[in-house]
Every structure is written in C-alpha cells, then in structure tokens.
Image (tube, rainbow, N blue to C red):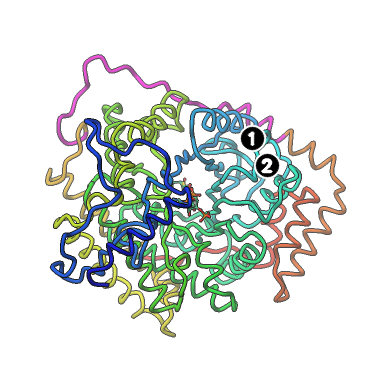
Amino acid sequence: MGQDARQRWQQRYEAALAGGKVRDADFTTLSGVEVDPVYGPADEASVENFERIGYPGEFPFTRGLHATGYRGRAWTIRQFAGFGNARQTNERYKMILAEGGGGLSVAFDMPTLMGRDSDDPRALGEVGHCGVAIDTAADMDVLFDGIDLEATTTSMTISGPAVPVFCMYLVAAERQGADLGKLNGTLQTDIFKEYIAQKEWLFAPEPHLRLIGDLMEYCAANIPAYKPISVSGYHIREAGSTAAQELAYTLADGFAYVELGLSRGLDIEAFAPGLSFFFDAHVDFFEEIAKFRAARRIWARWLRDVYGAQTEKAQQLRFHTQTAGVSLTAQQPDNNITRTAVEALAAILGGTQSLHTNALDEVLALPSAKAAHIALRTQQVIAEETGVLNVADPLGGSWYVEALTDEMERQAEEIFTRIKDMSADGTMTAGILRGIEDGWFTGEIAEAAFVYQRALEKGDKKVVGVNTLTGSVEGEEPLEILRVSHEVEREQKAELTGRRQDRDDEAARAAVQRMVEVGRTEANMLPAMLDAVRAEATLGEICDALRAEWGQYTEPARF
Ligand SMILES: C[C@H](C(=O)O)C(=O)SCCNC(=O)CCNC(=O)[C@H](O)C(C)(C)COP(=O)(O)OP(=O)(O)OC[C@H]1O[C@@H](n2cnc3c(N)ncnc32)[C@H](O)[C@@H]1OP(=O)(O)O
C-alpha cells in the first residue's frame, strides 16, 4: 500500500465529490475551523503495518466503508419499535418518520417471534406486549398502511419464523403495488444466535439452515438490495459475553452463512452483500470503537482470503448498532440518557451504518412516547450539533484505539481457532453446530457474565445508582410506564377469527400443504410459502405445518 494510500483515498473522495455524493453541508468546527474529511500520518511508511489501518473506503476497511465517511451519508436513525396491534404500531412508525427517523425497525410480540397465532393457548397474556402481533398478511397491510415500502428501508427483527414473516411483508408490498425487486431492508433470520443466546428457535439447525439457504437464494436472485440475514451479536453480548466473544461468535456465525451460500452454489459476490451485522454498543467507549473497527477488518480479510470474495461490496461488513440494554438501570433511570448517548457516540465513531438508541425506561417496559422521543433526539443532537459527521474515523491512528483494535482482532482469531478445533470437517459451520450441541457457547457466555457480576459485587466495576452513588435523586419523578392493555389480545383474536372466516379456508389449507410438499424436494420453498401467505394462511398454521414435518428443537441438557 505504501505511501500512496492517501492518494488513492483522495481520488475516491474527489470522484464522490464530482458525482454529487458528498452532502452540501457545513464541515467546519463550531468555531469555524475548516477540517479535512479524513486525517492520516504524514509518513505512511513510518507506521508499522500501515496497511492494516489504511484509509476509509479501501480494504481492509478498518477506517470505514466509504471514502466520504458520514459526509456522504449519515448513519440511518432506525428506532426499533412495535407494540399492541398493527394499527397502534403503524401510528408510532408515522410519528418516527415524521420526526426525522430514517428507516423503520419492527419489534414483534413473543407469540409472533415463536411462530404462534394470537389465539394459540400458549400466546395467552403475551399478545402485543413486547412488540406488535402479526398473524396474517392482512396485519402487515395495516402495519405499513400509508408507508411506501419501496421508498422506506424496513428492518424486521425475527429469526425463528423469519421466512414466513418475510413472505407476509412481500405480499403486503405487492398489494401496495411496489416493485418487489426494488425493496431494500433487513430481516434478522440469524438462527445461530438463537441457539447460542436468545433461544427463540422453532426447528433443529438442519431444516432451519435449508430454509435460510432458500431465502438467501431467493433474495440474491430477486431482491438484490435486500439483506436477508442480520448476523447478530447484540443478544450474545446482552446474555453476558465479553466484547471479543460478541465479535468472534458473531463473525463466526457470519462465516457459517457464507459457507451455507457457497454450499448452495450461490455466487459470493451476489449474496455476501446481503449479509449484514448487528452489534451491541456497550458503555466502555474505546473498547466498543475498537470492536467495530476490528469487525470490519476481520470480515474483509476472511471474505477475501478464506472465501474468495473479490469485490469490495462483498468484502465489506455493514452493521446496525443498538445501545446496550443491559447497561441501563432501574435505579436513577434518568442517567440512562447519558449512558445511551455515550454508547451511541461509540457506535458512530466506530462507523455504524444504522443505529437504535434505547429509551431511558426500556429497563422497565416498552418505551413511552416521551422516552422514545428523547432517544430519537439523542441521535439527532449527536448528528446535528457535535461535528461527528465532518471527519471519517476520527480516532484512527490513536495509539490506544489502534492497539485495542489489534487486541480485539487477536482475541477473535483465537476464538475462531477454538471453534474450528471443534469442527469435524474443517468448516466453521460444523464447529458452531458442535459448540451449540455441547453447550460450549452458553457455557463460555455464562462464565464471562459470572466474572463481570463478581467484579460488580466486589466493587471493581462500578455502575452509578447500583453499586456506587446509590439512593434516590432529589426531584426525581416516578416514570410513566407504557402498559399494553389486555384489550389488544381480545381484539387481535377477534380480528383473526374474522379473517379465517373471510378467507377460502380450503385454498389456505391446500396452499400450506403444497408448501410442505415442496419442502420434501430440493426446490426453493419461498414461492410456495408466498402462495400460502397470499391465501391468508396464518403464521401459526405455516409454522405448525413445518413443526409437524421437521420436529421441534429441544436444547441439549447441560449441567
Ligand atoms: C434487541 C432487539 C431484540 O431482539 O428484541 C433486536 O434484535 S433489534 C434489531 C434491529 N435490527 C436492525 O434494525 C437492523 C438494521 N440493519 C440495517 O438497516 C441494514 O442491514 C444495514 C446495517 C446494512 C444498514 O442499512 P441502511 O440502508 O440503513 O444503511 P446503508 O449504510 O446501507 O446506506 C444506504 C445506502 O447508502 C449508501 N451509503 C451510505 N453511506 C455512504 C457514503 N458515505 N457514500 C456513498 N454511499 C453511501 C450505502 O452504500 C447504501 O447504498 P446501497 O444500498 O446501494 O449499497
């Protein structure tokens, strides 16, 4: 790379400028000082292994994906939201978009996340509580009523029943008259992290991975901009892992999806850009920034050197970030605004593409409208007032941040080796599946959580309001909590009964049966699943049919 990395960056930047890809905005400090779009060493040769750092927009992307950084485009403000029924959530989305939110992010309720209908006895008491209840494509129509799906990028956080829910989304877009090939958005789909940390699975890994393979194939062929998998470290971290474990397990899961795509004969240049990532931004500011920078570098290196991706688009790690829910405290909850702001800043300085900031009351309940508003404004204050959009990777070259980035990478590589050592056939996939079966991941995470908890109890690590500076704060008012009425459940069940009555029942059942039959062949299941959804088959009916066919997953017991 040598001395001319800066020149290559300059050419890229100028090309972007000439192409109108740099926003027309004020890029000076508050006091009016002109600042460059990026900074680097005067003499690249004087920095050991400078090519591991480089410039933004160039392999290995340690300093970011784009030569222009946030001067080209700021991160997407994507607030995760959903509660009650589709109508209530639609109103919240319209509020988010009207207030400057850049994209949507759907939170589903627990029955939906588990592939159960709202009238399933197991859903009792849960309908609409931790997210929105979606039973059929008609609910999706209401969820996105008045929101142009072709023009809005939407993320859907669902993994077990991701594929049928995605089919409902496509059908809703189809009914809006959207060109499906132009849709852009993200589906979580990451089943590995369910087995490792979150535990919202439906079937055993094997049939599940087949379905995910079908989804990858379908999207790469038909909806090129869509990201069918959001490989998620967030839940691994929230379960108690360290930053390096979060990084390594997540990237290893990502490698396994690459292996899945390759095993299906898909073109890595076409499907790798559809793998996006989702990380936690915890409260240790510098460690988190280092983690994000290391993530980009490791991914680019492995995609190029191990899996043979040639194009930059296929080597680039794109990620969404959510501030750390586990860092929030029920004690002195107003302090959560401060924690969230610091964590958001870490994500931004780490070069995130998309960001959710938690509401101060999320430790207690779903966000109230006021708390959701403050969380949104937190991102906007950072974006509009602090100057962070002016300079790409402003901490690049900091001795501390570079050393910590190297350390994150070293630890992650060590973990990859341990996972590979568990693999019977040398693939990352076999190592991960073995680690899941043996409870290795859950054991490692539990151990890390234990070490941190002990440090908290000894007072080596501190949390304000919890183990230091405790007690009530003068003038603090009790929080107003959002409560979802049980009425929602009654209404949603009545709605579902009505839909079952209105549809051609025979046609819906036959379509589900056809989908099951396609599943017995090697053909892609998505077209048949789409037909079932068009016939208003419910999520529970589709998932039950697949559960009956493939069996349910039970976690191996571990003591
Ligand atoms: C905890 C909770 C739970 O479990 O309960 C959860 O899981 S919540 C989980 C919630 N999950 C999420 O919200 C996941 C969100 N994920 C995403 O939005 C995506 O996967 C993402 C991370 C790739 C971000 O996508 P995005 O569309 O918002 O942002 P992008 O950065 O891709 O930007 C959009 C377009 O602008 C382009 N672009 C961006 N910046 C620049 C620049 N400086 N110069 C030139 N072009 C640029 C990109 O290449 C892209 O174009 P082009 O498209 O042409 O390349």
Proximity of marks 1 and 2: CB atoms separated by less than 8 Å: yes
> Could you say whether the residue bearing mark 2 is in a helix, strand or loop?
helix
- Residue named by callout 2: 140
**Left or right of residue 418: residue 15:** right
Q: Residues within 10 Å of mark 2 (few under 14, many from 20)?
A: many
Compared to residue 477, the image places residue 119 above or below, namely: below
Residue 310 colored in magenta in the image: no
Compared to residue 207, the image places residue 144 above or below, namely: above
Name the quarter where the N terminus is drawn.
bottom left
Mark 2 sits near ligand 1, with its Cβ under 8 Å away: no
Residue closer to the observer: 337 or 276 = 276
Task: Tell me the amino acid under the disc marked 2.
Answer: Met
**Left or right of residue 313: residue 410:** left
The dominant secondary structure in magenta is loop
Residue 476 colored in magenta in the image: yes
Residue closer to the observer: 43 or 450 = 43
Taking the spot 65% from the left edge, 46% from the top edge, the residue there is: 150
**Residue 8 is drawn in which quadrant?**
bottom left
**Left or right of residue 420: residue 308:** right
Q: Residue 185: image x %, image y %?
A: 56, 51
Residue closer to the observer: 272 or 356 = 272
Task: Tell me the amino acid under the disc marked 1.
Answer: Ala
Taking the spot 44% from the left edge, 54% from the top edge, the residue there is: 198
- Residue named by callout 1: 86
Q: Residues within 10 Å of mark 1 (few under 14, many from 20)?
A: many
> Could you say whether the residue bearing mark 1 is in a helix, strand or loop?
helix
**Residue 365 is drawn in which quadrant?**
top left
| Magenta-drawn segment | 466-493
Q: Residue 494: image x %, image y %?
A: 74, 33
